[in-house]
Amino acid sequence: MIAQTIQLALAPVFVLVAIGNFMNILTGRLARIVDRSRHLQGRHTDTKGPDHDEVVRELRSVDRRIKLVNRAILMLVLAALVIGLTVGLLFIEGMSQMNLEWAVKITFFMAIALLMFALLTFLRETRIATADLRIPDTYLELERTL
Protein backbone atom coordinates (compact mmCIF):
# COMPACT_ATOMS: atom_id res chain seq x y z
CA MET A 1 0.00 0.00 0.00
CA ILE A 2 2.81 2.46 0.83
CA ALA A 3 4.47 1.77 -2.55
CA GLN A 4 1.24 2.74 -4.31
CA THR A 5 1.02 5.92 -2.20
CA ILE A 6 4.58 6.84 -3.17
CA GLN A 7 3.70 6.32 -6.83
CA LEU A 8 0.66 8.57 -6.45
CA ALA A 9 2.79 11.23 -4.76
CA LEU A 10 5.28 11.39 -7.65
CA ALA A 11 3.17 13.68 -9.86
CA PRO A 12 2.78 16.36 -7.17
CA VAL A 13 6.47 16.08 -6.36
CA PHE A 14 7.38 16.71 -10.01
CA VAL A 15 5.17 19.81 -9.89
CA LEU A 16 7.07 20.84 -6.75
CA VAL A 17 10.37 20.54 -8.62
CA ALA A 18 8.99 22.66 -11.46
CA ILE A 19 7.84 25.28 -8.96
CA GLY A 20 11.32 25.36 -7.42
CA ASN A 21 12.92 25.88 -10.83
CA PHE A 22 10.47 28.63 -11.67
CA MET A 23 11.14 30.34 -8.33
CA ASN A 24 14.85 30.24 -9.13
CA ILE A 25 14.18 32.06 -12.39
CA LEU A 26 11.98 34.65 -10.69
CA THR A 27 14.44 35.38 -7.89
CA GLY A 28 17.21 35.91 -10.45
CA ARG A 29 14.95 38.23 -12.39
CA LEU A 30 14.00 40.09 -9.22
CA ALA A 31 17.68 40.60 -8.38
CA ARG A 32 18.31 42.20 -11.79
CA ILE A 33 15.22 44.42 -11.45
CA VAL A 34 16.34 45.56 -7.99
CA ASP A 35 19.82 46.35 -9.37
CA ARG A 36 18.23 48.45 -12.11
CA SER A 37 16.07 50.19 -9.51
CA ARG A 38 19.12 51.11 -7.46
CA HIS A 39 20.87 52.46 -10.54
CA LEU A 40 17.85 54.60 -11.44
CA GLN A 41 17.49 55.85 -7.88
CA GLY A 42 21.09 57.01 -8.06
CA ARG A 43 20.33 58.92 -11.25
CA HIS A 44 17.12 60.41 -9.84
CA THR A 45 18.78 63.37 -8.10
CA ASP A 46 21.35 63.90 -10.88
CA THR A 47 18.85 64.51 -13.68
CA LYS A 48 16.61 67.39 -14.69
CA GLY A 49 13.99 68.07 -17.32
CA PRO A 50 13.16 65.35 -19.87
CA ASP A 51 15.97 63.09 -18.60
CA HIS A 52 14.51 63.25 -15.08
CA ASP A 53 11.04 62.49 -16.42
CA GLU A 54 12.41 59.42 -18.20
CA VAL A 55 14.10 58.22 -15.00
CA VAL A 56 10.83 58.65 -13.06
CA ARG A 57 8.88 56.80 -15.78
CA GLU A 58 11.32 53.91 -15.67
CA LEU A 59 11.32 53.86 -11.86
CA ARG A 60 7.52 53.55 -11.90
CA SER A 61 7.77 50.68 -14.34
CA VAL A 62 10.48 48.97 -12.30
CA ASP A 63 8.35 49.38 -9.17
CA ARG A 64 5.42 47.71 -10.93
CA ARG A 65 7.67 44.88 -12.15
CA ILE A 66 9.01 44.30 -8.63
CA LYS A 67 5.45 44.02 -7.30
CA LEU A 68 4.48 41.55 -10.05
CA VAL A 69 7.51 39.33 -9.51
CA ASN A 70 6.91 39.36 -5.75
CA ARG A 71 3.28 38.41 -6.34
CA ALA A 72 4.32 35.56 -8.63
CA ILE A 73 6.81 34.31 -6.01
CA LEU A 74 4.09 34.46 -3.34
CA MET A 75 1.76 32.39 -5.52
CA LEU A 76 4.51 29.85 -6.14
CA VAL A 77 5.26 29.52 -2.42
CA LEU A 78 1.56 29.01 -1.74
CA ALA A 79 1.39 26.44 -4.56
CA ALA A 80 4.38 24.60 -3.09
CA LEU A 81 2.76 24.55 0.35
CA VAL A 82 -0.49 23.22 -1.12
CA ILE A 83 1.47 20.52 -3.01
CA GLY A 84 3.04 19.54 0.31
CA LEU A 85 -0.45 19.32 1.78
CA THR A 86 -1.55 17.16 -1.16
CA VAL A 87 1.33 14.74 -0.61
CA GLY A 88 0.58 14.69 3.11
CA LEU A 89 -3.07 13.89 2.44
CA LEU A 90 -2.05 11.06 0.12
CA PHE A 91 0.07 9.51 2.84
CA ILE A 92 -2.60 9.99 5.53
CA GLU A 93 -5.12 8.35 3.20
CA GLY A 94 -2.76 5.46 2.50
CA MET A 95 -1.90 4.85 6.15
CA SER A 96 -5.33 5.34 7.70
CA GLN A 97 -7.61 3.93 5.00
CA MET A 98 -9.64 7.17 5.17
CA ASN A 99 -11.19 8.34 1.91
CA LEU A 100 -9.52 11.71 1.27
CA GLU A 101 -9.81 11.57 -2.52
CA TRP A 102 -11.84 14.80 -2.77
CA ALA A 103 -9.44 16.68 -0.51
CA VAL A 104 -6.49 15.48 -2.60
CA LYS A 105 -8.22 16.54 -5.82
CA ILE A 106 -9.08 19.97 -4.44
CA THR A 107 -5.59 20.66 -3.07
CA PHE A 108 -3.90 19.52 -6.27
CA PHE A 109 -6.24 21.69 -8.35
CA MET A 110 -5.54 24.65 -6.05
CA ALA A 111 -1.80 24.17 -6.49
CA ILE A 112 -2.08 24.03 -10.27
CA ALA A 113 -4.34 27.11 -10.27
CA LEU A 114 -1.80 29.03 -8.16
CA LEU A 115 0.96 27.93 -10.53
CA MET A 116 -1.08 29.17 -13.51
CA PHE A 117 -1.71 32.53 -11.83
CA ALA A 118 2.01 32.82 -11.12
CA LEU A 119 2.74 32.14 -14.79
CA LEU A 120 0.21 34.77 -15.88
CA THR A 121 1.73 37.28 -13.46
CA PHE A 122 5.18 36.48 -14.83
CA LEU A 123 3.85 37.02 -18.34
CA ARG A 124 2.56 40.47 -17.33
CA GLU A 125 5.96 41.36 -15.89
CA THR A 126 7.82 40.25 -19.01
CA ARG A 127 5.41 42.20 -21.21
CA ILE A 128 6.15 45.36 -19.21
CA ALA A 129 9.89 44.70 -19.44
CA THR A 130 9.65 44.19 -23.19
CA ALA A 131 7.58 47.33 -23.66
CA ASP A 132 10.14 49.32 -21.67
CA LEU A 133 12.96 48.15 -23.88
CA ARG A 134 13.09 50.87 -26.49
CA ILE A 135 15.86 50.62 -29.04
CA PRO A 136 16.27 53.96 -30.82
CA ASP A 137 15.75 53.83 -34.58
CA THR A 138 19.21 55.34 -35.07
CA TYR A 139 20.74 52.14 -33.70
CA LEU A 140 18.58 49.99 -35.92
CA GLU A 141 19.67 51.87 -39.05
CA LEU A 142 16.37 51.07 -40.72
CA GLU A 143 17.28 53.05 -43.82
CA ARG A 144 19.94 50.45 -44.63
CA THR A 145 19.20 47.20 -46.39
CA LEU A 146 21.13 44.35 -44.86
Image (cartoon, helix red, strand yellow):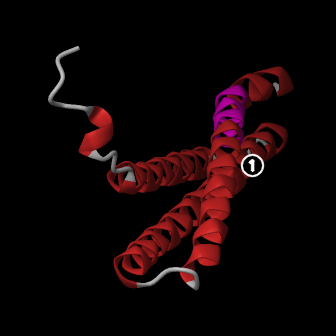
Is residue 47 shown above or below 38?
below
**Is 64 on the left-hand or right-hand side of 27?**
left
140 and 78: which one is in front?
140
- The residue depicted at 19 percent of the width and 31 percent of the height is 142
Amino acid type, label 1: Gly
Residue 124 visible to an observer of this rendering: no
Task: Give the image quarter of residue 75.
Answer: bottom right
59 and 10: which one is in front?
59
Is residue 137 shown above or below 47?
above
Is residue 23 shown above or below 54?
above
123 and 96: which one is in front?
123
Q: Position of residue 17 (x, y in %)?
A: 71, 34
- The residue depicted at 38 percent of the width and 50 percent of the height is 133
Q: Position of residue 108 (x, y in %)?
A: 57, 45
- The residue depicted at 37 percent of the width and 83 percent of the height is 49
- Which image quarter is the N terminus in? top right
- Which image quarter is the C terminus in? top left
User: Which region of the structure is painted magenta?
Assistant: 10-20
**Is 27 on the left-hand or right-hand side of 3?**
left
What secondary structure prevails in the magenta region?
helix
**Is 142 on the left-hand or right-hand side of 23?**
left
Q: Position of residue 58 (x, y in %)?
A: 44, 69
Residue that extends furthest to the top in the rendered view of this protein: 146
Residue 50 visible to an observer of this rendering: yes
Is residue 128 shown above or below 98?
below
Residue wearing tag 1: 84
- The residue depicted at 67 percent of the width and 61 percent of the height is 35
Q: Position of residue 10 (x, y in %)?
A: 71, 27
Task: Give the image quarter of residue 60.
Answer: bottom left
Q: Secondary structure at mark 1?
A: helix
Magenta includes 124?
no
Q: Residues within 10 Å of mark 1 (few under 14, many from 20)?
A: some
